[in-house]
Image: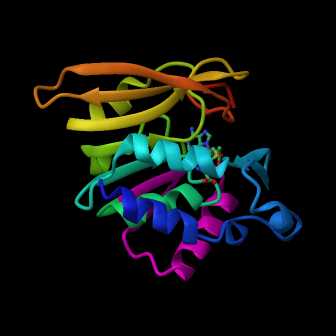
Amino acid sequence: MDWQKLETYFRSLDRSLFVGNDMKKHASHDMPLPIGFGQTISQPSLVLEMTQLLEPENDSKVLEIGTGSGFQTALLAKMSAEVYTVERINKLAEEAKKRLDALNFSNIYYKIGDGSTGWQEHAPYDRIMVTAAAGLLPDELVNQLANGGRMVIPIGPSTFQELKLITKTDHGEINIKTVEWVRFVELKGPYGWVE
Ligand code: SAM
């Protein structure tokens, strides 16, 4: 991964473009902010850290679950070849697409619906980023991760979760590492929480 490119883009990305008018004055603060529908744009330092953990390469095909505001999507799209992003809330997905189109991204593919079981049609993915808290590690996401791939996912109860880095060796063996405690909104669906 090009660490310098990621840091430079992260510092240049205006977070106020990704929140509503009422939240723009708080956009430069390193904290999560509401984006409507009970959802949040994540703390920017955590978005950067999770992207660094994922280590997207410029030829990576990335799956993102939880488009939200599109802020994390922009970082992933800047650092990789293609991003497939899934959001269950129609309005959030539409707003994120408008913002990312305005930033001239042409390598992002959008799906509205439940992403807790991934996006089988375009699998396998070199990288998978999950930005909502799963109760369990979804088997489908593990199966859709390419050999040699990396996945970052928060797993645990709705209060606090462990951020996990899942890696798949070139022979398909799975390794799971716990990175730190985090707090995310719930991943809805069969591996998360009841709608
Ligand atoms: N990364 C986003 C950003 O930069 O703004 C923040 C994502 S927010 C913390 C989590 C998102 O996951 C919410 O927009 C929520 O609607 C979405 N979500 C929750 N469960 C989902 C599911 N099963 N499938 C797709 N999206 C889901």
> Is residue 16 visible in the rendered structure shown here?
yes
Left or right: 137 in relation to 127: right
Query: Is residue 101 found inside the magenta-colored segment of the image?
Result: yes
Residue 89 is inside the magenta segment: yes
Residue 120's quadrant in the figure?
top left
Residue at 45 percent of width and 48 percent of height: 51
Q: Position of residue 143 (x, y in %)?
A: 28, 30
Residue at coordinates 38% horizontally, 42% vertically from top-left? Answer: 54
The vertical placement of 124 against 90, above or below, is above
Relative to 4, 163 lies left or right: right
Furthest residue in direction right, as rendered: 22
Q: Does 112 appear above or below 132?
A: below
Q: Position of residue 21 (x, y in %)?
A: 84, 71
Number of residue marks? 0
Q: Position of residue 193 (x, y in %)?
A: 65, 25
Q: Is residue 39 left or right of residue 118?
A: right
Give the magenta part as a residue range: 83-112
Q: Between residues 66 and 46, which one lies in front from this camera angle?
A: 46
Q: Position of residue 45 (x, y in %)?
A: 61, 48
Query: Picture quarter containing residue 184?
Result: top right
